[in-house]
Amino acid sequence: MIPYGRQDITDEDIQSVIDVLKSDFLTQGPMIGHLERKFAAYVGSKYCVAVSSATAGLHLACMSLGLKDGDVFWTVPNTFVASANCGLYCGASVDFVDIDPDTLNISIPALSEKLASAEKEGKLPKLIIPVHFSGRSCDMEAIYKLSRKYGFRVIEDAAHSIGASYNGSKTGSCEYSDLAVFSTHPVKIITTGEGGLITTNNPDIYEKLIRLRTHGITKTPSLMSKKPDGGWYFEQLELGYNYRMSDIHAALGISQMDRLDNYITRRQNLAARYMGKLAHLPLVLPSVSGLADSSWHLYVVRLELDKINISHKKVFELLRRAGVGVNLHYIPVHLHPYFQKLGFAKGDFLEAEKYYGEAITLPLYPKLTDVEQDYICEVMEGVLQ
Ligand SMILES: *Cc1c(COP(=O)(O)O)cnc(C)c1O
Protein backbone atom coordinates (compact mmCIF):
# COMPACT_ATOMS: atom_id res chain seq x y z
CA MET A 1 0.00 0.00 0.00
CA ILE A 2 1.30 3.46 -0.90
CA PRO A 3 0.74 5.40 2.35
CA TYR A 4 -0.74 8.92 2.41
CA GLY A 5 2.32 10.23 4.21
CA ARG A 6 5.67 8.88 5.26
CA GLN A 7 8.89 10.05 6.91
CA ASP A 8 12.25 10.04 5.13
CA ILE A 9 15.15 8.84 7.28
CA THR A 10 18.71 8.97 5.93
CA ASP A 11 22.00 7.48 7.16
CA GLU A 12 22.96 10.97 8.38
CA ASP A 13 19.78 11.10 10.48
CA ILE A 14 20.58 7.71 12.00
CA GLN A 15 24.17 8.68 12.72
CA SER A 16 23.07 11.90 14.44
CA VAL A 17 20.84 9.89 16.79
CA ILE A 18 23.59 7.35 17.48
CA ASP A 19 25.95 10.22 18.35
CA VAL A 20 23.52 11.44 21.00
CA LEU A 21 23.13 7.93 22.42
CA LYS A 22 26.91 7.81 22.91
CA SER A 23 27.00 11.30 24.49
CA ASP A 24 26.44 12.49 28.07
CA PHE A 25 22.94 13.86 27.55
CA LEU A 26 19.89 11.88 26.51
CA THR A 27 17.12 14.16 27.62
CA GLN A 28 17.26 17.95 27.44
CA GLY A 29 20.91 18.67 26.58
CA PRO A 30 22.74 20.67 23.92
CA MET A 31 20.65 19.34 21.01
CA ILE A 32 17.47 21.03 22.24
CA GLY A 33 19.00 24.51 22.14
CA HIS A 34 20.60 23.73 18.80
CA LEU A 35 17.28 22.68 17.26
CA GLU A 36 15.46 25.67 18.79
CA ARG A 37 17.99 28.19 17.44
CA LYS A 38 18.04 26.55 14.02
CA PHE A 39 14.25 26.53 13.77
CA ALA A 40 13.81 30.11 15.04
CA ALA A 41 16.39 31.29 12.49
CA TYR A 42 14.58 29.37 9.75
CA VAL A 43 11.12 30.83 10.40
CA GLY A 44 12.37 34.23 11.53
CA SER A 45 11.04 34.26 15.10
CA LYS A 46 12.86 35.52 18.19
CA TYR A 47 12.22 32.36 20.20
CA CYS A 48 11.53 28.68 19.75
CA VAL A 49 10.65 26.10 22.40
CA ALA A 50 10.88 22.38 21.60
CA VAL A 51 8.32 20.14 23.31
CA SER A 52 7.21 16.51 23.33
CA SER A 53 4.40 16.99 20.76
CA ALA A 54 2.42 19.70 19.01
CA THR A 55 -0.49 18.80 21.28
CA ALA A 56 1.69 19.57 24.31
CA GLY A 57 2.82 22.74 22.53
CA LEU A 58 -0.75 23.89 21.91
CA HIS A 59 -1.61 23.21 25.55
CA LEU A 60 1.37 25.27 26.76
CA ALA A 61 0.55 28.02 24.26
CA CYS A 62 -2.98 28.27 25.70
CA MET A 63 -1.59 28.30 29.26
CA SER A 64 0.98 30.95 28.38
CA LEU A 65 -1.86 33.28 27.33
CA GLY A 66 -3.68 32.62 30.60
CA LEU A 67 -6.55 30.59 29.17
CA LYS A 68 -8.56 29.24 32.09
CA ASP A 69 -11.85 27.99 33.46
CA GLY A 70 -14.69 30.24 32.32
CA ASP A 71 -12.87 31.49 29.21
CA VAL A 72 -13.96 30.74 25.66
CA PHE A 73 -11.71 29.95 22.70
CA TRP A 74 -12.50 29.25 19.06
CA THR A 75 -10.98 27.02 16.42
CA VAL A 76 -12.25 25.34 13.23
CA PRO A 77 -14.10 22.02 12.90
CA ASN A 78 -11.92 20.86 9.98
CA THR A 79 -8.87 19.95 12.05
CA PHE A 80 -7.33 17.28 14.23
CA VAL A 81 -8.99 17.08 17.66
CA ALA A 82 -5.84 18.44 19.35
CA SER A 83 -6.66 21.97 18.12
CA ALA A 84 -9.73 21.90 20.38
CA ASN A 85 -8.47 19.66 23.19
CA CYS A 86 -5.57 21.99 24.05
CA GLY A 87 -7.93 24.68 25.36
CA LEU A 88 -10.22 22.17 27.06
CA TYR A 89 -7.19 21.01 29.09
CA CYS A 90 -7.16 24.56 30.55
CA GLY A 91 -10.81 24.29 31.60
CA ALA A 92 -11.99 26.73 28.92
CA SER A 93 -14.91 26.05 26.58
CA VAL A 94 -14.58 25.63 22.85
CA ASP A 95 -16.61 26.92 19.96
CA PHE A 96 -15.98 26.61 16.23
CA VAL A 97 -15.96 28.86 13.18
CA ASP A 98 -16.85 27.19 9.89
CA ILE A 99 -14.36 26.86 7.03
CA ASP A 100 -14.11 28.63 3.70
CA PRO A 101 -14.90 26.01 1.01
CA ASP A 102 -12.17 27.39 -1.25
CA THR A 103 -9.18 27.53 1.12
CA LEU A 104 -10.54 24.96 3.65
CA ASN A 105 -9.20 27.35 6.32
CA ILE A 106 -11.16 29.47 8.77
CA SER A 107 -13.77 31.55 6.93
CA ILE A 108 -13.04 35.23 7.51
CA PRO A 109 -16.64 36.33 6.82
CA ALA A 110 -17.95 33.66 9.23
CA LEU A 111 -15.40 34.75 11.83
CA SER A 112 -16.30 38.44 11.47
CA GLU A 113 -19.98 37.66 11.80
CA LYS A 114 -19.53 35.42 14.82
CA LEU A 115 -17.34 38.02 16.54
CA ALA A 116 -19.92 40.75 15.96
CA SER A 117 -22.68 38.68 17.55
CA ALA A 118 -20.42 37.43 20.36
CA GLU A 119 -19.62 41.04 21.22
CA LYS A 120 -23.33 41.86 21.52
CA GLU A 121 -23.81 38.90 23.85
CA GLY A 122 -20.67 39.68 25.86
CA LYS A 123 -19.19 36.30 24.92
CA LEU A 124 -16.05 37.20 22.99
CA PRO A 125 -13.36 34.51 22.87
CA LYS A 126 -10.12 35.00 24.78
CA LEU A 127 -8.17 33.43 21.97
CA ILE A 128 -8.56 31.92 18.54
CA ILE A 129 -6.64 28.98 17.08
CA PRO A 130 -6.65 29.19 13.28
CA VAL A 131 -5.33 26.05 11.57
CA HIS A 132 -3.22 26.28 8.41
CA PHE A 133 -4.94 23.33 6.76
CA SER A 134 -2.73 21.21 4.49
CA GLY A 135 0.12 23.72 4.89
CA ARG A 136 -1.61 26.68 3.30
CA SER A 137 -1.64 29.74 5.52
CA CYS A 138 -4.84 31.27 6.80
CA ASP A 139 -5.44 34.93 5.99
CA MET A 140 -3.40 36.01 9.01
CA GLU A 141 -3.56 39.72 8.29
CA ALA A 142 -7.37 39.64 8.38
CA ILE A 143 -7.32 37.59 11.59
CA TYR A 144 -4.83 40.00 13.13
CA LYS A 145 -7.02 43.01 12.29
CA LEU A 146 -10.01 41.31 13.90
CA SER A 147 -7.89 40.44 16.97
CA ARG A 148 -7.10 44.17 17.39
CA LYS A 149 -10.73 45.13 17.00
CA TYR A 150 -12.14 42.54 19.40
CA GLY A 151 -9.20 42.00 21.75
CA PHE A 152 -8.50 38.29 21.38
CA ARG A 153 -5.13 36.52 21.17
CA VAL A 154 -4.02 34.27 18.31
CA ILE A 155 -2.27 30.86 18.39
CA GLU A 156 -1.51 29.48 14.93
CA ASP A 157 -1.95 25.71 14.72
CA ALA A 158 0.90 25.30 12.23
CA ALA A 159 1.15 21.51 12.62
CA HIS A 160 0.99 21.17 8.81
CA SER A 161 3.08 24.19 8.00
CA ILE A 162 6.81 23.78 8.53
CA GLY A 163 8.31 25.51 5.50
CA ALA A 164 5.13 27.36 4.47
CA SER A 165 5.07 31.11 3.84
CA TYR A 166 2.60 33.96 4.06
CA ASN A 167 3.03 37.50 2.67
CA GLY A 168 6.73 36.86 2.08
CA SER A 169 7.49 35.57 5.60
CA LYS A 170 7.77 32.02 6.85
CA THR A 171 4.82 30.72 8.86
CA GLY A 172 6.03 30.84 12.47
CA SER A 173 7.51 34.33 12.22
CA CYS A 174 4.46 35.33 14.31
CA GLU A 175 4.04 38.66 12.56
CA TYR A 176 0.27 38.39 13.00
CA SER A 177 -0.01 36.09 16.04
CA ASP A 178 1.16 35.52 19.60
CA LEU A 179 2.49 32.03 19.00
CA ALA A 180 2.70 29.33 16.35
CA VAL A 181 2.87 25.60 17.08
CA PHE A 182 4.38 23.04 14.68
CA SER A 183 4.32 19.23 14.75
CA THR A 184 7.25 16.93 14.02
CA HIS A 185 5.17 13.75 14.02
CA PRO A 186 6.41 11.38 11.25
CA VAL A 187 3.59 12.14 8.79
CA LYS A 188 4.26 15.88 9.00
CA ILE A 189 6.92 17.86 7.10
CA ILE A 190 10.01 16.91 9.13
CA THR A 191 10.13 14.52 12.05
CA THR A 192 11.65 14.03 15.48
CA GLY A 193 9.67 10.80 16.07
CA GLU A 194 7.23 12.63 18.32
CA GLY A 195 7.66 16.34 18.92
CA GLY A 196 6.47 19.90 18.64
CA LEU A 197 8.06 23.32 18.12
CA ILE A 198 6.54 26.53 19.45
CA THR A 199 7.64 29.94 18.14
CA THR A 200 6.96 33.41 19.56
CA ASN A 201 8.50 36.89 19.62
CA ASN A 202 7.31 37.70 23.13
CA PRO A 203 10.00 37.27 25.86
CA ASP A 204 7.44 36.86 28.68
CA ILE A 205 5.58 34.15 26.80
CA TYR A 206 8.91 32.48 26.05
CA GLU A 207 9.98 32.44 29.73
CA LYS A 208 6.61 31.03 30.69
CA LEU A 209 6.79 28.26 28.06
CA ILE A 210 10.26 27.26 29.26
CA ARG A 211 8.98 26.94 32.84
CA LEU A 212 5.74 25.18 32.00
CA ARG A 213 7.60 22.63 29.88
CA THR A 214 9.41 21.51 33.05
CA HIS A 215 6.82 21.36 35.88
CA GLY A 216 6.68 25.15 36.38
CA ILE A 217 10.15 25.02 37.89
CA THR A 218 12.77 27.77 37.75
CA LYS A 219 16.47 27.77 38.61
CA THR A 220 16.81 31.53 37.94
CA PRO A 221 17.41 33.27 41.31
CA SER A 222 15.83 36.56 40.21
CA LEU A 223 12.51 34.78 39.66
CA MET A 224 12.52 33.01 43.05
CA SER A 225 10.45 34.06 46.04
CA LYS A 226 13.40 33.67 48.42
CA LYS A 227 17.16 33.44 48.46
CA PRO A 228 18.39 30.01 47.25
CA ASP A 229 19.03 27.56 50.13
CA GLY A 230 22.10 26.29 48.26
CA GLY A 231 23.46 25.12 44.95
CA TRP A 232 20.77 22.46 44.61
CA TYR A 233 17.90 24.89 45.00
CA PHE A 234 15.02 25.46 42.56
CA GLU A 235 11.46 26.65 42.98
CA GLN A 236 8.19 25.57 41.45
CA LEU A 237 6.32 28.78 40.69
CA GLU A 238 3.24 27.40 38.96
CA LEU A 239 1.74 24.08 37.89
CA GLY A 240 3.57 22.85 34.80
CA TYR A 241 4.15 19.54 33.06
CA ASN A 242 6.93 17.32 31.79
CA TYR A 243 6.54 18.24 28.13
CA ARG A 244 10.24 18.14 27.29
CA MET A 245 11.65 16.89 24.04
CA SER A 246 14.68 14.61 24.44
CA ASP A 247 18.08 15.25 22.85
CA ILE A 248 17.64 11.99 20.93
CA HIS A 249 14.55 13.39 19.24
CA ALA A 250 16.07 16.83 18.74
CA ALA A 251 19.15 15.40 16.98
CA LEU A 252 16.88 13.76 14.43
CA GLY A 253 15.10 17.08 13.87
CA ILE A 254 18.35 19.01 13.41
CA SER A 255 19.49 16.51 10.81
CA GLN A 256 16.10 16.56 9.05
CA MET A 257 16.12 20.35 8.83
CA ASP A 258 19.06 20.16 6.42
CA ARG A 259 16.66 18.65 3.87
CA LEU A 260 13.63 20.78 4.69
CA ASP A 261 13.80 23.05 1.65
CA ASN A 262 14.28 20.04 -0.63
CA TYR A 263 11.26 18.41 0.96
CA ILE A 264 9.10 21.46 0.33
CA THR A 265 10.27 21.72 -3.28
CA ARG A 266 9.46 18.07 -3.88
CA ARG A 267 6.04 18.38 -2.21
CA GLN A 268 5.23 21.43 -4.36
CA ASN A 269 6.42 19.58 -7.39
CA LEU A 270 4.21 16.56 -6.62
CA ALA A 271 1.25 18.87 -5.96
CA ALA A 272 1.76 20.52 -9.35
CA ARG A 273 1.93 17.09 -11.00
CA TYR A 274 -1.36 16.07 -9.34
CA MET A 275 -2.92 19.31 -10.61
CA GLY A 276 -1.97 18.45 -14.16
CA LYS A 277 -2.86 14.78 -14.07
CA LEU A 278 -6.22 15.05 -12.29
CA ALA A 279 -7.51 18.24 -13.94
CA HIS A 280 -9.87 16.43 -16.36
CA LEU A 281 -11.55 14.29 -13.68
CA PRO A 282 -14.79 15.10 -11.79
CA LEU A 283 -12.84 16.45 -8.82
CA VAL A 284 -12.43 19.80 -7.11
CA LEU A 285 -8.67 20.20 -6.79
CA PRO A 286 -6.97 22.50 -4.25
CA SER A 287 -7.29 26.07 -5.53
CA VAL A 288 -3.97 27.09 -7.01
CA SER A 289 -3.60 30.50 -5.37
CA GLY A 290 -1.59 29.07 -2.49
CA LEU A 291 0.54 26.75 -4.60
CA ALA A 292 3.86 28.53 -4.21
CA ASP A 293 3.49 29.28 -0.50
CA SER A 294 2.01 26.06 0.88
CA SER A 295 4.17 23.40 2.52
CA TRP A 296 1.79 20.83 0.97
CA HIS A 297 1.46 18.57 3.98
CA LEU A 298 -1.72 17.17 2.43
CA TYR A 299 -3.11 16.94 -1.08
CA VAL A 300 -6.89 16.83 -0.73
CA VAL A 301 -9.37 16.42 -3.58
CA ARG A 302 -13.15 16.73 -3.37
CA LEU A 303 -15.41 14.47 -5.40
CA GLU A 304 -17.99 16.15 -7.64
CA LEU A 305 -20.66 13.74 -6.47
CA ASP A 306 -23.32 15.07 -8.87
CA LYS A 307 -21.10 14.08 -11.81
CA ILE A 308 -20.33 10.50 -10.79
CA ASN A 309 -22.39 7.39 -10.12
CA ILE A 310 -20.40 6.14 -7.18
CA SER A 311 -20.42 7.09 -3.51
CA HIS A 312 -17.64 8.83 -1.61
CA LYS A 313 -17.22 5.79 0.62
CA LYS A 314 -16.97 3.47 -2.38
CA VAL A 315 -14.33 5.61 -4.12
CA PHE A 316 -12.30 5.52 -0.92
CA GLU A 317 -12.66 1.73 -0.65
CA LEU A 318 -11.69 1.09 -4.29
CA LEU A 319 -8.60 3.28 -4.00
CA ARG A 320 -7.49 1.44 -0.87
CA ARG A 321 -8.21 -1.89 -2.51
CA ALA A 322 -5.91 -0.88 -5.39
CA GLY A 323 -3.10 -0.18 -2.93
CA VAL A 324 -3.53 3.58 -2.77
CA GLY A 325 -3.46 4.45 0.94
CA VAL A 326 -5.88 7.35 0.84
CA ASN A 327 -7.09 8.99 4.03
CA LEU A 328 -9.60 11.63 5.11
CA HIS A 329 -8.67 14.87 6.87
CA TYR A 330 -10.77 15.57 8.86
CA ILE A 331 -13.85 14.16 10.55
CA PRO A 332 -15.37 17.48 11.72
CA VAL A 333 -14.34 17.83 15.36
CA HIS A 334 -17.85 18.76 16.52
CA LEU A 335 -19.21 15.41 15.25
CA HIS A 336 -17.09 13.31 17.62
CA PRO A 337 -19.14 11.86 20.52
CA TYR A 338 -17.13 13.78 23.11
CA PHE A 339 -17.98 17.10 21.45
CA GLN A 340 -21.60 16.13 20.89
CA LYS A 341 -21.82 15.64 24.67
CA LEU A 342 -20.60 19.23 25.01
CA GLY A 343 -23.69 20.29 23.05
CA PHE A 344 -22.58 20.40 19.40
CA ALA A 345 -24.77 18.76 16.77
CA LYS A 346 -24.79 17.74 13.15
CA GLY A 347 -25.73 20.76 11.07
CA ASP A 348 -23.78 23.25 13.21
CA PHE A 349 -20.98 23.81 10.69
CA LEU A 350 -22.29 23.01 7.24
CA GLU A 351 -19.23 23.76 5.09
CA ALA A 352 -17.01 21.46 7.17
CA GLU A 353 -19.68 18.76 7.06
CA LYS A 354 -20.23 19.03 3.30
CA TYR A 355 -16.47 18.90 2.77
CA TYR A 356 -16.26 15.78 4.95
CA GLY A 357 -18.72 14.03 2.64
CA GLU A 358 -16.56 14.64 -0.45
CA ALA A 359 -12.91 14.85 0.60
CA ILE A 360 -10.13 12.34 0.00
CA THR A 361 -6.46 12.83 0.92
CA LEU A 362 -4.13 11.41 -1.73
CA PRO A 363 -0.60 10.19 -0.93
CA LEU A 364 1.96 13.01 -0.79
CA TYR A 365 5.43 12.80 0.74
CA PRO A 366 8.93 13.61 -0.52
CA LYS A 367 9.91 10.07 -1.42
CA LEU A 368 6.73 9.36 -3.40
CA THR A 369 8.03 8.62 -6.89
CA ASP A 370 6.66 9.95 -10.17
CA VAL A 371 5.86 6.35 -11.12
CA GLU A 372 3.86 5.79 -7.93
CA GLN A 373 2.07 9.08 -8.43
CA ASP A 374 1.21 8.19 -12.02
CA TYR A 375 -0.23 4.90 -10.75
CA ILE A 376 -2.35 6.74 -8.14
CA CYS A 377 -3.74 9.02 -10.87
CA GLU A 378 -4.50 6.07 -13.17
CA VAL A 379 -6.35 4.28 -10.37
CA MET A 380 -8.31 7.44 -9.60
CA GLU A 381 -9.26 7.82 -13.24
CA GLY A 382 -10.40 4.18 -13.43
CA VAL A 383 -12.47 4.46 -10.24
CA LEU A 384 -14.23 7.65 -11.34
CA GLN A 385 -15.13 6.40 -14.83
C1 LIG B 1 -0.81 16.49 13.85
C2 LIG B 1 -1.64 17.64 14.32
C3 LIG B 1 -1.64 18.09 15.65
C4 LIG B 1 -0.97 17.34 16.76
O1 LIG B 1 0.35 17.06 16.53
P1 LIG B 1 1.14 16.04 17.50
O2 LIG B 1 2.57 16.42 17.31
O3 LIG B 1 0.82 14.68 17.00
O4 LIG B 1 0.66 16.26 18.89
C5 LIG B 1 -2.34 19.24 15.96
N1 LIG B 1 -3.03 19.90 15.02
C6 LIG B 1 -3.09 19.49 13.74
C7 LIG B 1 -3.86 20.30 12.75
C8 LIG B 1 -2.40 18.34 13.35
O5 LIG B 1 -2.48 17.92 12.09
Image (cartoon, rainbow, N blue to C red):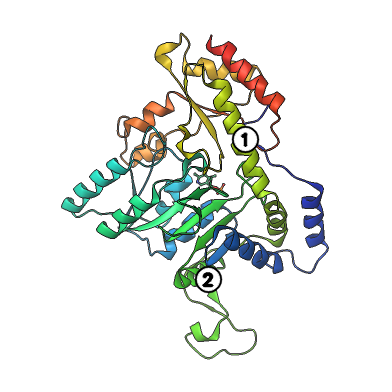
Q: Is residue 289 above or below residue 62?
A: above
- Circle 1 packing at 10 Å, graded few (<14), some (14-19), many (20+), is some
Residue under pointer 1: 269
Mark sitting on residue 160: none
Relative to 10, 346 lies left or right: left
Decide if residue 327 is in sight here: yes
Residue lying at 34% horizontally and 40% vertically, measured from the top left? 107
Q: Disc 1 marks which amino acid?
A: Asn
Q: Is residue 385 above or below residue 216?
A: above
Residue 369 position by quadrant: top right
Question: In the depicted view, which residue is nearer to us: 283 or 359?
Answer: 283
Residue lying at 37% horizontally and 61% vertically, measured from the top left? 67
Q: Earlier in the sequence, mark 1 or mark 2?
A: 2
Task: Report helix, strand or loop for mark 2.
Answer: helix
Residue lying at 70% horizontally and 51% vertically, measured from the top left? 256
Question: In the depicted view, which residue is nearer to us: 142 or 130?
Answer: 142
Residue lying at 48% horizontally and 60% vertically, measured from the top left? 60
- Circle 2 packing at 10 Å, graded few (<14), some (14-19), many (20+), is many
Relative to 116, 304 lies left or right: right
Q: Is residue 63 above or below residue 367?
A: below
Residue 350 position by quadrant: top left
Mark sitting on residue 211: 2
Q: Percent x, y for residue 208?
A: 48, 70
